[in-house]
Image: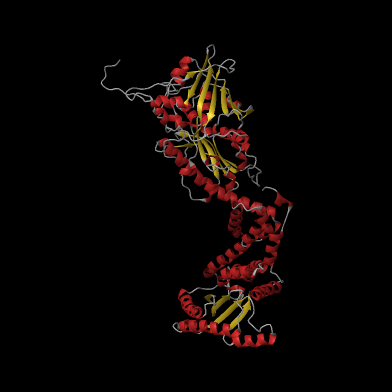
Amino acid sequence: MSNSRYRMSISLNVLNHLGLNLYSNTPAVLAEVIANAWDADATEVKVDFNIAQKTITVTDNGHGMDVDDINDKYLHVGYQKRGDTSDYHTPGGRKPMGRKGIGKLSLFSIAKKIFVYSLKKGGENESFLMDSDEIKKAIQNEDPSSPGEYEPEQVKFDVDIEKQGTIIKITELKKLRLTQASINGLRKRIARRFGIIGEQWDFRIFVNGEEVNFSDRDYFHKARFIFQYGAYDYAQYCQNLDTDNDTGDKMSFERPCRFDSKGNATEEGVHKISGWIAIARHSNDLDDGQGQEDNLNKITIVVRGKVAQEDILNELRMGSMISKFIYGEIYADFLDEDRKEDIATSSRQRLVEDDPRYIATKKFIDNEIKHIRTETDKLKEKKGLEQAITYNPYIKEWYDELRPPHLQEPAKKIFAAIDQAGVDEAHKQNFYADGVLLFESLKMNYALEKLETIDASNLDEFLSYLSDVDAIEAARYHEIVQERLSIIRKLREQVDKNVIEALLRDYIFDHLWLLDPAWERATEYKHMEQTLQRVVDGVTQKNKFVRTDIRYRRVSGAHVIIELKRPERLLEKTEIESQIRKYIAAVGNELKKDPNESHLLIESFCIVDRLPQGWEDRETRRTDEDSLKLYRIRVLTYTELINNANSAYSKFIQASESVTELRTLLDNIRSYKAESNDREP
């Protein structure tokens, strides 16, 4: 024993911090077992899920372990797997994935008992049980003054290993519930965690007897464009990439794969990567399941063929819309060179953020995404237009005839925006028509901006813009009227009186076009509302059965007072006149304070469910209405209000049957349906 005064000891309790509860998900745990098989030069790994027994068994044909390997390496927590050389390889010539020898502890994150069976070529069968409950007892019983030990239980070797290899049997699963669906999901996630799967790597993985392939990642088909780094062609798996109409080539782009210590791309860069970054067609394509683990909207960092960090994209804090469409995978083996400091965190699921290599990688990816954003915007403009003119010949005709021709470039942006929004096919034609109308309006704004520079040389160009003003206004107002008629029809469907009153009460005060089509916009004045309320309070105090719902609005050329009466009230003409004249007087007195407002008329509406008493007689009604007109008071039932509005707007539609060329174009775009609309662009 050393005579040194000082010594360092390691407690068993460190196991709690190193792995018993460290890993966060099952795929990450299984990836550690598969990585150990790679490091053991295995050519095949079989992962078998047994739903009935609730077990997971991982079998490899690696070089196996004898008792010394088990004690000195496998059970040696913190064993340096890469030896002392600066470029360590396994006996089979592989660069090992493991480094610190703590991956096996991750198994206790998902299960309580781990059975290990191993056979080294020419050696004896070895088998033992690691039990998390027994490990915890050893920790609790440990003498604080000296390091403790945990001795796994030797068990019967009741498995079949033909020549060499290792079997890990994971039992008494904690939270994982094995179902066929969960097994299918785990198969997919295993495929996504390794970049060294397949015959070219001499490393094959099987899940329940079926080989895991690159295509099992189940996300390449979501790519619309792909940007590639390095020699390997990932585009071969992307069957749904857009194609270039000019060349017929898939939208796949090669990018630089070297960068310097500051993250700037350069051919002489000290760092080299490979991999890909793709753009999905729709942002919701990247929602691959229920949990965060299933979110594909990320860029994974892979080191030595295994995921080293789930996502680096979320650290870039991009604000642009394209960030919702990005996913990818970057292979960066330089992050784990033997001769350099370990860059992985203690959890083995992330990389050390302040390491210069990581900072350079993040900067390079950030720069790349900025470039991809610019290129993708251009591509989406081009493809958006191609899609629009392919789906609808009327759009192609309009686009080809845009004058002057330089207006075609900004027009592309509108179709790109529609394309990027991911509008479903049932509504796409409406969006195209709205886009054309929007662009025609923007074209007018452009013309007005050019007004100051007009001279004889470009007068014809300006007049060509102005010739469309009437057409744009007519088309725009025609669509507004159609929308209003739709609202009116829905109001008419509400036959329940209380429902009609409630709808109008919530709607009419801010949409005075129901009363008069000329009243487009109304302005609310709080002080006038307060004045009216004081008058209303005086009326209700005198008659506790009176309930009023009254508002003041200012519209172009008039002041408007609107009162809604509750449905059950049956009123007399004199009662209505008396109440509303008080409101008119109150508003008039307030307006006298402002000379700019006092000259305008005061219009008053009383909306009732049932006509006043006696109005069933036409002559009586006509006489009373003439009397009320002297004070600019109108009485309407809820039904009359809706019918009058419907009649007024329907007449506008009938009067505008002599449609303009622009109206015809918009109608054609909206109504166009082709067989091509049923296919994916």
Image location (x, y in percent) of residue 211:
63, 28
544 left or right of 396?
left
Q: Is residue 164 visible?
A: yes
Q: Is residue 100 visible?
A: no
Image location (x, y in percent) of residue 73:
45, 20
In the image, residue 393 sits, relative to residue 6, either above or below, namely: below
Q: Residue furthest right?
A: 675
In the image, residue 249 sits, relative to residue 488, either above or below, namely: above
Nearer the observer, 236 or 604? 604
The quarter of the picture where residue 149 lies is top left
Image location (x, y in percent) of residue 135:
44, 25
Image location (x, y in percent) of residue 417:
58, 54
Q: Say which quadrant the N terminus sits in.
A: top left
In the image, residue 174 sits, relative to residue 320, either above or below, namely: above
Nearer the observer, 105 or 248? 105
Counting the numbered discs, the total is 0
Residue sitting at x 63%, y 61%:
434
Residue sitting at x 45%, y 32%:
21
223 left or right of 540?
right
